[in-house]
Amino acid sequence: MLAAATVLLLAAAVARAAEVDPAGYVIYCPCMGRFGNQMEQHLGAFHFAMVLGRTMVLPPIVGHEPRSTVAKMTAFEDVFQLPAIQNQFKTITLAEFQRDIAPKIWPKEARKAFCWTPRKALNGDDSEMSCRAKDGNPFGPFWDYVGVDEFADSVFYGQTTGGFNVGSLKDKEKWKDNYPPASFPVLAFVGAPAAFPAQQKHWHYQKHFRYSTRITSRAKTFIEARLQRPFVGIHLRNDVDWVRVCEHVDPTRNLFASAQCLGEPPMDGEQLSKEMCAPSEKTVLEQLVEVVGRSGARSVFVASDRDHLIPEINEALSAYDVKAYKLDDNDAFVSLAVLELADEFIGNCVSTFSSVVSRSRSFKWAKPKSSHFWGYRKPSTRPKIEL
Ligand code: GFB
C-alpha cells in the first residue's frame, strides 16, 4: 500500500516537473564570493523570482577550492532540503529544468544572458556590447554545468528597469512589461539578481534553507558523540584573506555582514571596529570564558578556516573543566549545521559565513536562538555607566 502511494507521489512529482510554468523561470550564477556571500544573495534573488511569479531554477553552490582555477559545482539539493524551500518558493531543480523544461522553451538561439550593463572582456576590450556571460571563472564553469555552450544574445536590464529591487508595483511592472514570459521564458542572469549583502527585510527567508539530511545527521551525530550540552559554538574567521578585509574597516560604515550587529543603516552611535572584524586572541578567550561562565556551558565547538585555537581555549577554560572540539574533516556545511544548533553562538560581525548562522538561529527554530559577536555587545546588554 505504502509502495503504491510512493509510486503515485513520485509520478505526480515527475508530471509536475514536466509542465512548463507559463509565468517563466529565473536562473542565475551565484558568481560572487564563497558560500556566505552566495547565501546573502540567494535571499534577495529568491524574493525577486517570487515577486515576479516565476519559478526559480535552484542554483548549485559554487565552490572555490584552494589551488584550483575551476570552480566546483555542488547541486542545491545536495546541500539543502527541497521540501523546506518549496514550502515558500516555486522552484525546480537544475536537473529537472535541463531535462524537462529547457528543451521545450529555451532553444540555443533563444538563450539571452541578462546583465545590468555590458561587461568588458578580461583583456579590457569593450568593443563588443555583451554580457560576456561565460568569460572567466566561475562564470564559464557555471554555464557549462547548466549546459549552455554559448548565449545567442545579451540583454542589459539596467536600461529598462530599476534593477532587481522589485519592492514597488512600478518596478515590478517594468520587469513584466519589458520581459514578458511569452517572449522571455527564462531570465538568465550573469550574477544574482539581488543586493549584497542581503537586505534586512529578506533575512527571514533563511529559515527555508534547511541543510540536507546527510549534513544535519552528521552534525547531530558529532554533537551527540563529542559535545556535552549546553555547548557554545564559535566561529573564528582568521585566514590571511580575512586580515586583508579587516584593514578596510571604516567605523562609520557597514562592511559585508556587519548589519547583523550594527543594523541597517548603522544605528545611532554604533561603530564598526577592527576588533569586531579581526578579534585578538585576548578578546576571543576573554569573551568565550565570559559566555561559558554565564551559560554554564560544558563544552565548546570551534569552526574556523585556519586556526581553531584549541590548546589556547582549553587552557583558558581549564578552571571550568570545559574542553574545545572541532570536526575531524573541517567540513564547512557540517560546521554551519553544528553552529546553528549550539546553545550559545559567538560569531564574527563582518563575516557572511557567521551571518548564515546568526540568521538561521534567529529564524529557523520555533524558539529563536540568540547570537553574540566578537568585540561587540548589543546596546541592551552593555553595562550602564553611572555618572
Ligand atoms: O562564506 P564566505 O563567503 O564568508 O567565505 P566571509 C568564506 C569561506 O571560507 C567559506 C571558508 O565559504 C568557507 O569555505 N570558511 C570560513 C570556513 N569560515 C570557515 C569555518 O569556520 N570552517 C570552514 N570549514 N570553512 C568573504 C568571502 O568571506 O571573505 C569573500 O566570501 C572574500 O568573497 C572575503 O573572499 C575575503 O564573508 O567570511
Image (cartoon, grey):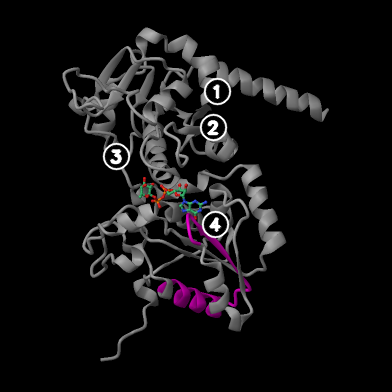
Res 46 quadrant in image: top left
**Alpha-carbon distance for marks 2 and 4?**
22 Å
Q: Which residue is mark 3?
A: 167
Counting residues from the start of the chain, the first of labels 1 and 2 encountered is 2
Q: Is residue 154 left or right of residue 289?
A: left
Q: Nearer the viewer, mark 3 or mark 2?
A: 2
Q: For the N terminus, which image quadrant?
A: top right
Res 249 quadrant in image: bottom left
Q: Amino acid at mark 2?
A: Ala
- Asked if ligand 1 lies within 8 A of label 3, the reply is no
Can residue 19 be seen?
no
Q: Position of residue 45 (x, y in %)?
A: 38, 36
What's the mark number on residue 95?
Answer: 1
* Dot 3 alpha-carbon crowd within 10 angstroms: few under 14, some 14 to 19, many 20 or more: few
Q: Amino acid at mark 4?
A: Glu
Q: Amino acid at mark 3?
A: Gly
* Dot 2 alpha-carbon crowd within 10 angstroms: few under 14, some 14 to 19, many 20 or more: some
Residue 33, placed above or below residue 314: above
Q: Which residues are magenta?
A: 283-307
Residue at x 66% of width, y 65% of height:
227
Residue at x 42% of width, y 9% of height:
107
Q: Which residue is mark 2?
A: 75
Q: Is residue 260 left or right of residue 126?
A: right
Q: Which residue is mark 4?
A: 340
